Image (spheres, helix red, strand yellow):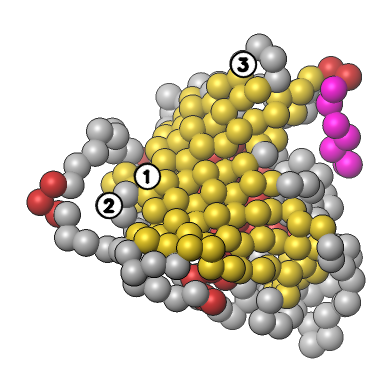
Amino acid sequence: MCSGRMIDHMPATRNLHLGHASEACPDAYYVRRDASRFISTLHAQGAWQPGEQHLAPASGLVLAEVERRLPSDKLVSRAAFDVLGVIESGEFTIDVHMLRPGRSIELIEASMRHGERTSIRARIWRLAATDTASVQGNEWTPLPPPDAMPAFAMSSLWNGGYVKSLEARRAVDARPGRARSWIRSHLPLVDAQPDPPTAGFVKLIDTANGLAVREDPGSVFYANVDLTVHFIRQPMSGWVGLDTRVNFGPTGLGETFSVLSDAHGPVGTAAQSLTVRLGQDLPSRGG
């Protein structure tokens, strides 16, 4: 793990998480190099391979850069992240483009790029805020509060620095493929920068696939190739609640679906498409 605060002269490697070689690094998932370049820290390390980033903080950072570079009073309605390949550790660039400007509706595209290779491509719809309090309502069942659930040690099932950065709670009625959970992290996305509210919530959502484990990840591979989040209101930072179901089909396809909550109740949904593999089809986990 990282050995403390970042040293004055960070290594210039593109291929390793900051902290991989036990050098000092900050208590954050990323360090900003300049306006569009970053380096991942060991806290962003993925669960399947040691030399990759976890999609959870990576998706949060992509959205945070959208909010930072294109500030708006519009609200995020949908954020969809497609994973085009391994999200490599080390240095990378985030690009942001307005695809469809508008006074009430806009569509933004953002990507994470490692040299010439793109690992994540995202599209974010933002909609104008209007007063619909008189007709608000949803059909989701509220979660019990975090203090009503026992602590859950995710590191007993999953590897990686990102999982180690989390505090998790899970209801006692959890079973394979179904769980109600809360998670939070004290780490910001970027060293010495506060998280934008929605991005700070999104940085935890991709954890859903590891909270309601249907099969032992040591014998079945079921990584997600995307993450799609829909909101009915702007979420508050802090604990993220996930009422999650994991389903595998008979031909290598799967889905993780979650109802998302903050401290005030349900805020939206998240879905993850899974590639399910076993036996000789298992990819190398790299240690």
Q: Name the residue under label 3.
A: 249
- Residue at image coords 61%, 24%: 254
Residue 56: within the magenta? no
Q: Is residue 230 found left or right of 143 in the rendered image?
A: right
The disc labelled 1 sits on which kind of residue? Gly
Query: Closest to the observer: 106 or 213?
Result: 106
Give the residue at x 21% y 61%: 130
Determine which residue is flagged by label 1. Answer: 268
Distance in Å between CA atoms under marks 2 and 1 = 12 Å
**Which residues make up the magenta segment?**
281-287
CA gap between label 3 and label 1 equals 25 Å
Q: Disc 2 marks which amino acid?
A: His
Q: What element carries label 1?
A: strand
Distance between mark 3 and mark 2 Cα atoms: 34 Å
User: Dot 2 corresponds to which residue?
Assistant: 264
Q: Which residue is drawn at 59% across and 80% down?
A: 192
